[in-house]
Protein backbone atom coordinates (compact mmCIF):
# COMPACT_ATOMS: atom_id res chain seq x y z
CA UNK A 1 0.00 0.00 0.00
CA UNK A 2 1.44 3.37 -0.99
CA UNK A 3 1.08 6.38 1.24
CA UNK A 4 2.34 9.88 1.85
CA UNK A 5 3.54 11.61 4.98
CA UNK A 6 2.97 15.32 5.45
CA UNK A 7 5.35 17.36 7.57
CA UNK A 8 3.05 19.84 9.34
CA UNK A 9 5.91 22.07 10.44
CA UNK A 10 6.85 22.67 6.79
CA UNK A 11 3.32 22.99 5.40
CA UNK A 12 2.25 26.55 4.55
CA UNK A 13 -1.34 25.64 3.74
CA UNK A 14 -1.18 26.60 0.09
CA UNK A 15 -3.46 23.65 -0.83
CA UNK A 16 -1.64 22.94 -4.07
CA UNK A 17 -1.48 19.28 -3.08
CA UNK A 18 -5.23 19.21 -2.41
CA UNK A 19 -5.84 20.40 -5.94
CA UNK A 20 -3.13 18.21 -7.46
CA UNK A 21 -3.79 14.67 -6.27
CA UNK A 22 -5.58 12.93 -9.15
CA UNK A 23 -7.27 10.61 -6.67
CA UNK A 24 -8.50 13.35 -4.33
CA UNK A 25 -6.76 11.83 -1.32
CA UNK A 26 -5.55 15.05 0.32
CA UNK A 27 -7.96 17.44 2.00
CA UNK A 28 -8.01 20.30 4.42
CA UNK A 29 -7.59 19.20 8.03
CA UNK A 30 -9.24 20.56 11.15
CA UNK A 31 -5.76 21.35 12.49
CA UNK A 32 -4.22 24.73 11.83
CA UNK A 33 -0.69 26.03 11.42
CA UNK A 34 0.80 28.89 13.42
CA UNK A 35 -0.98 31.44 11.25
CA UNK A 36 -4.34 29.79 11.73
CA UNK A 37 -4.54 28.35 8.23
CA UNK A 38 -5.82 24.81 7.93
CA UNK A 39 -3.23 22.11 7.39
CA UNK A 40 -3.87 19.17 5.08
CA UNK A 41 -4.32 15.47 5.70
CA UNK A 42 -4.10 12.31 3.67
CA UNK A 43 -6.93 9.79 3.82
CA UNK A 44 -6.97 6.70 1.66
CA UNK A 45 -9.52 4.18 2.91
CA UNK A 46 -9.66 2.42 -0.44
CA UNK A 47 -5.89 2.24 -0.97
CA UNK A 48 -6.14 4.37 -4.06
CA UNK A 49 -2.78 6.14 -3.81
CA UNK A 50 -0.66 5.21 -6.82
CA UNK A 51 2.53 6.84 -5.49
CA UNK A 52 2.63 9.14 -8.51
CA UNK A 53 4.33 11.76 -6.30
CA UNK A 54 2.56 14.63 -8.03
CA UNK A 55 1.67 15.99 -4.59
CA UNK A 56 5.28 15.90 -3.43
CA UNK A 57 6.66 17.37 -6.65
CA UNK A 58 4.28 20.30 -6.60
CA UNK A 59 4.58 21.10 -2.89
CA UNK A 60 6.67 24.30 -2.77
CA UNK A 61 7.76 23.59 0.79
CA UNK A 62 8.96 19.98 0.38
CA UNK A 63 6.49 18.93 3.05
CA UNK A 64 5.38 15.65 1.46
CA UNK A 65 7.19 12.32 1.30
CA UNK A 66 5.82 9.46 -0.77
CA UNK A 67 6.22 5.82 0.21
CA UNK A 68 5.61 3.34 -2.57
CA UNK A 69 4.05 0.10 -1.38
CA UNK A 70 3.64 -3.31 -3.00
S1 LIG B 1 1.30 10.15 -4.54
FE1 LIG B 1 -0.21 10.67 -6.16
S2 LIG B 1 -2.03 9.47 -5.64
FE2 LIG B 1 -0.72 9.47 -3.81
S3 LIG B 1 -1.47 11.20 -2.57
FE3 LIG B 1 0.20 12.00 -3.86
S4 LIG B 1 -0.79 12.80 -5.72
FE4 LIG B 1 -2.27 11.48 -4.64
S1 LIG C 1 1.40 21.64 -1.20
FE1 LIG C 1 2.76 21.42 0.58
S2 LIG C 1 2.68 23.40 1.63
FE2 LIG C 1 0.95 23.33 0.21
S3 LIG C 1 -0.76 22.54 1.48
FE3 LIG C 1 0.20 20.77 0.49
S4 LIG C 1 1.71 19.99 2.00
FE4 LIG C 1 1.14 22.08 2.58
Image (cartoon, rainbow, N blue to C red):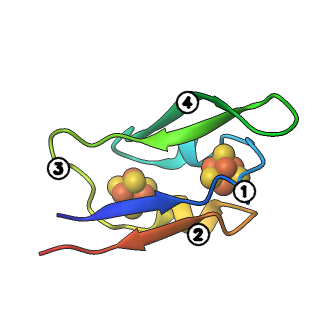
Badge number at residue 57: 2
Q: Count residues near mark 4 (Cα–Cα under 10 Å), then give few for <14, some for 14-19, many for 20+.
A: few
Position of the N terminus, as image quadrant, is bottom left
Name the residue: 15% across, 41% down.
Answer: 46
- First in sequence: mark 3 or mark 2? 3
Please tell me whether residue 58 is drawn above or below residue 25 in the rendered image. Answer: below
Can you tell me whether the CB of the residue at mark 1 lies under 8 Å from the nearest atom of ligand 2?
A: no
Q: Mark 1 or 3, which is nearer the eye?
A: 1
Q: Mark 3 or 2, which is nearer the eye?
A: 3
Badge number at residue 47: 3
In the displayed structure image, the side of residue 7 where residue 45 appears, left or right? left
In the displayed structure image, the side of residue 9 where residue 54 appears, left or right? left
Q: Which residue carries the number 4 mark?
A: 29
Badge number at residue 9: 1
- Of residues 41 and 58, the one nearer the viewer is 41
Name the residue: 19% across, 73% down.
Answer: 69
User: Please, what secondary structure does the residue beneath circle 2 have?
Assistant: helix
Q: Check whether the beta carbons of the residues at disc 1 and disc 2 lie within 8 A of each other.
A: no
Name the residue: 67% across, 69% down.
Answer: 62
Q: Mark 1 or 4, which is nearer the eye?
A: 1
Query: Where is residue 23 drawn, in percent x and y?
Result: 33, 43
Amino acid sequence: MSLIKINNSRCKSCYICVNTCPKGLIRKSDKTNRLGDYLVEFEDKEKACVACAMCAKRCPDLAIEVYRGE
